[in-house]
Amino acid sequence: NQTCVIIGASHAGVNAAFALRKEGWSGPIVLIDGDSNLPYHRPPLSKAYLTSDDDISSHLLKPAVSYQQHNIELKLGVVVERLDATTKQLSLSGGEQLGYDKLILATGARAFVPPISGLNSAKHVFTLRNAEDVNRIRDAYNQLAAQNRCRVAVIGGGYIGLETAASLRKMAADVTVIERESRILARVTTAQMSEFFTELHQQHGVNIATDKQVEAIQPGPHGDIVRCSDRSEIAADLIIIGVGVRVNTVLAEQAGIQLNNGIEVNQYGQTSNPEIYAIGDCSYHHNPHYDRKIRLESVQNAVDQAKVAAAHLCGKAKVYDAIPWFWSDQYDVKLQMVGLSDDHDEAIKRQEPEPNKFSVWYFKQDQLVAVDAVNHAKAYVLGTKLIKTQQALNKANIVDASVELNLANL
Ligand code: FAD
């Protein structure tokens, strides 16, 4: 009976453990995470969890009893400090040595903290990646708000920064989003979507400050002063940094595994060491629909890759062929994005009669490559099907909101 050890008990690792059992893995499964909470959903952290006073146990990926029922050993609050791929031994915090036959790296990513002068001495600066981060943000905000100090600067206008801004606004904070690029969401979506989200946040009273690189944080007479490269200054009681992540690759490096924008894997999730797999946010993989290598930060990708790796470990020939998708919730807007829109050559928009309900359809050489759907689950579902089938589409009917959106009309 071979032992499979999984490092990282979040979306990828937990799904891999359960998928292994489902596919028939009969040996021990050990799931390790440095986080001492039972594994939980990460997306609510910047959304419902931030605005509530919930305990993270309300957002568990699986109830505690499921791990026992599936004979999955959990080691929580334990960091894997060293991976020796030659002897197949792991050194754990606390001094334990643990052997494996097969290893899955589901180590994800951590929040990146850019070099900003004065950052370390500032009192209320946070990143947002795990439950403890949000607990600290909630505590600090509540304390400051009790003294009427509600000015928040969110550094970084990506999805996490914007969701955090929306949540804090709901908590009555006075929010400024500071973005280095000329538009928010520049790294992840098109100018059209950036414009929509800029207006959405402005309508909710958030100040969106673009073209501003944060250089320093200095103590001010009340709270902190965030100084930007254009010499502008933003006063803040609380500062949240959401400028992207760095992949956790230290263990892969120790094992001499091939890295490339993350941990490089084949269509089964296997790294350059065939006994070691990498899945989720940490993996750099080939997407057959777009015929290129990508690294994704999305729950669905973590789940899809977990299933593929588990199947392969159990001797089944399942390959990774998912179409990427991602969602984001801000205020009363649900964005669902399917496919990769970054190299489209044509974008067409369908605006429904209701405000804040539309979809943007992206084509490359007349082939549908992605759909962004705002409050429009139907467009997202249809888009997913049509990207897969690659049939020729009637673009006039997509744009015309008086024509019902269904397969027959497209
Ligand atoms: P992670 O979730 O990063 O987990 C990796 C785990 O590995 C961590 O728990 C870490 O503690 C552990 N670990 C790493 N190294 C070690 C070690 N050496 N020893 C022990 N443990 C280790 N995605 C969406 O699709 N939709 C959303 O709306 C959305 N919202 C998000 C909101 C927030 C605030 C955040 C942070 C992410 C959001 N995401 C969203 C992204 C999504 O959560 C990630 O894509 C997903 O969590 C990736 O899962 P993962 O298991 O690959 O990695």
Image: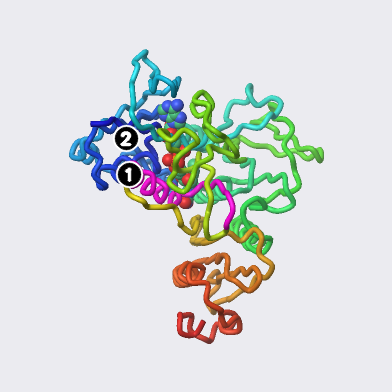
Q: Residue at x 45, y 40 (%)?
A: 270
Q: Position of residue 165 (x, y in %)?
A: 56, 48
Which color scheme did the rendering employ for the protein?
A: rainbow
Give the residue type that dot 1 points to.
Leu
In this rendering, does residue 325 appear at all? Answer: yes
Q: Amino acid at mark 2?
A: Leu
Query: What residue range appears in magenta?
Result: 291-314
Q: Compared to 83, does 168 lie above or below?
A: below
The mark found on residue 261 in the picture is none
Q: Which one is in front, 109 or 210?
A: 109
State the image coordinates of residue 250 (x, y, percent, origin top left): 52, 26
Residue 151 appears anywhere in the view? no
Which quadrant would residue 42 be assigned to in this image?
A: top left
Callout 1–callout 2 Cβ contact below 8 Å = yes
User: Magenta segment: does it hold 332?
Assistant: no
Residue 13: x and y, percent? 37, 39
- At x 27%, y 31%, the residue is 2
Write down the residue under mark 1: 61
For the point 38% across and 32% down, the residue is: 103
Q: Which numbered dot is residue 38?
A: 2
